[in-house]
Image (tube, rainbow, N blue to C red):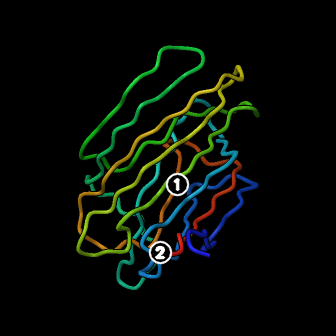
């Protein structure tokens, strides 16, 4: 069936880990989709980030930490004024802030474009929904570009400090 999502890789985090990598991006699909659900962290008030991964000297899934990440996002909040954020020449892409209370969690969907194409920049669009410590809803919508022409083989999630405590992560190929 055209338009189907095909599961490529998944990881369920049940105890603290510094990174979550989803690998398997290649020329099989033009578009890849990532879902992250119920993500919580070990250290309060931390930022959730992600990077492209690439094959370096035969080692798949190496996060690219070059300062080539640009993004823009609009954040909407049920409990405060909305805001906009953007940055260029960063070493990662920003998703959201989360904390340690059990009800604080991040959820979202990321569409990945040109990830597998060594002749194009990799870019993404994101939509995320989050709950904070007082059970208030916030979310964001935006996108970004990795300004390097390289083939990427996956995606790596991590917190700016501390670890990812729990969460579900899934990488899908979008059937042509």
Residue linked to disc 2? 25
The label shown at residue 157 is 1
For the residue pair 43 and 136, the one nearer the viewer reads as: 136
Taking 26 as reference, is 50 above or below it? above
On the image, the x and y values in percent for residue 51 come to 42, 57
For the residue pair 152 and 139, the one nearer the viewer reads as: 139
Residue at 26% across, 52% down: 67
Q: Is residue 157 left or right of residue 53?
A: right
Residue at 27% across, 75% down: 118
The extreme top residue here reads 80
The extreme front residue here reads 1
Q: CA distance from mark 1 to mark 2?
A: 15 Å
For the residue pair 64 and 148, the one nearer the viewer reads as: 148
Q: Is residue 101 left or right of residue 152?
A: right
On the image, the x and y values in percent for residue 128 come to 55, 41
Residue at 47% across, 69% down: 154
């Amino acid at each position: 069936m055209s338009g189907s999502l095909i599961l490529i890789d998944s990881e369920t985090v049940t105890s603290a880990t510094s990174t979550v990598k989803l690998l398997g991006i290649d020329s099989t699909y033009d578009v890849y989709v990532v879902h992250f659900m119920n993500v919580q962290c070990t250290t309060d008030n931390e930022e959730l980030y992600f990077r492209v991964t690439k094959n370096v000297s035969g080692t798949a899934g190496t996060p690219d930490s070059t300062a080539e990440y640009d993004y823009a996002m609009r954040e909407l909040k049920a409990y405060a004024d909305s805001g906009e954020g953007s940055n260029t020449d960063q070493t990662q892409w920003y998703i959201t802030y989360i904390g340690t209370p059990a009800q604080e969690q991040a959820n979202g969907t990321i569409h990945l474009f040109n990830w597998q194409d060594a002749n194009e920049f990799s870019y993404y669009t994101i939509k995320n929904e989050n709950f904070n410590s007082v059970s208030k809803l916030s979310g964001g919508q935006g996108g970004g570009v990795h300004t390097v022409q390289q083939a990427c083989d996956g995606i790596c999630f991590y917190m700016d400090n501390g670890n990812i405590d729990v969460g579900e992560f899934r990488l899908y190929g979008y059937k042509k």
